[in-house]
Image: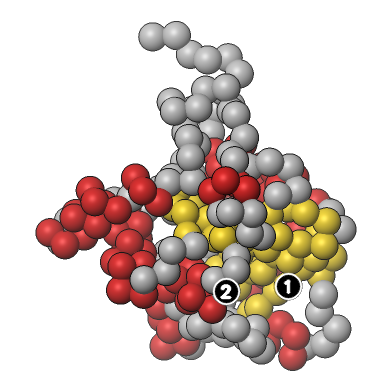
């Protein structure tokens, strides 16, 4: 087997599968997932890393991106509230993908595309400056200090994210982990973003169009405080 020398070495950390999928969820995967593809994203399908044709995909609509959409409730909510926007979601956890597909069916939204994999591969094929808004909501906190390099808010992820975001684009981060807040505020501005908070209420108050996710509800039950951080790409 020959390894492509141009392909970056990327370790993936975290789960790809959880509990056995229900029969209905397997049906969503088999029947719906291919039709929701944003185009060839993986190295196997797109070794030349040809950029995605976003004007064709979303009929010229502005493009938003959700990184790790979990169970998909926020992504479907935003799609329903913003039919004039196209939203791409990336999530490697197949159980989360199946949950999203079920929600898409029930909501009847059509302005979504789904990449069931690593967001870093998606960054490779999104045209520079093509995304108007990005969401990172309750990402894996990797609480142990030796695992902090696995967090999304590191140069390996933030540099390509900054490249695909348009000037003036908004980047929202929600987390209930105080040390994740610290690392976010330390790292994100280093990659061409400004934090838009002017006072404590700006990070304590949810966004006006927010829908509380299952991960946030778990954090609240366990007594942790959500933080809502808003950045703008310079």
Asked whether 58 or 11 is in front, the reply is: 58
Please provide percent x and percent y for residue 74. Answer: 48, 73
- Say above or below: 172 vs 228: above
Structural distance between the alpha carbons of marks 2 and 1? 19 Å
> Which residue was labeled with disc 1?
230
> Which residue was labeled with disc 2?
82
- Say above or below: 224 vs 139: below
Which of the image's four quarters has the C terminus? bottom right
Q: What residue is drawn where x is 73% and y is 53%?
A: 165
Residue 79 is at least partly visible in this image: yes
Q: Is residue 75 left or right of residue 199?
A: left
Asked whether 125 or 136 is in front, the reply is: 125
Packing grade of label 1 (10 A; few <14, some 14-19, many >=20) is: some
Q: Is residue 70 left or right of residue 177?
A: left
Please provide percent x and percent y for residue 7. Answer: 56, 23
Asked whether 225 or 122 is in front, the reply is: 122
Furthest-left residue in this view: 23
């Amino acid at each position: 087997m020959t390894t492509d020398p141009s392909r970056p070495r990327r370790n993936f950390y975290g789960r790809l599968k959880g509990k056995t999928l229900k029969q209905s969820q397997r049906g969503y995967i088999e029947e719906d997932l291919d039709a929701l593809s944003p185009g060839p994203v993986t190295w196997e399908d797109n070794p030349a890393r040809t950029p995605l044709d976003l004007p064709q995909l979303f009929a010229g609509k502005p493009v938003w991106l959700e990184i790790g959409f979990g169970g998909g409730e926020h992504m479907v909510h935003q799609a329903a509230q913003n039919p004039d926007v196209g939203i791409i979601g990336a999530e490697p956890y197949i159980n989360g993908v199946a949950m999203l597909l079920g929600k898409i069916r029930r909501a009847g939204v059509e302005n979504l595309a789904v990449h069931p994999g690593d967001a870093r591969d998606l960054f490779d094929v999104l045209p520079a400056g093509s995304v108007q808004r990005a969401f990172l909501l309750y990402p894996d906190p990797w609480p142990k200090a030796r695992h902090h390099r696995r967090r999304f808010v590191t140069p390996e992820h933030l540099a390509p994210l900054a490249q695909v975001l348009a000037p003036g684009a908004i980047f929202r981060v929600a987390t209930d982990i105080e040390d994740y807040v610290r690392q976010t505020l330390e790292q994100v501005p280093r990659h061409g973003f400004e934090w838009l908070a002017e006072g404590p209420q700006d990070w304590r108050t949810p966004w006006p169009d927010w829908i509380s996710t299952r991960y946030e509800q778990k954090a609240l039950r366990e007594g942790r405080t959500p933080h809502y951080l808003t950045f703008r790409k310079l």
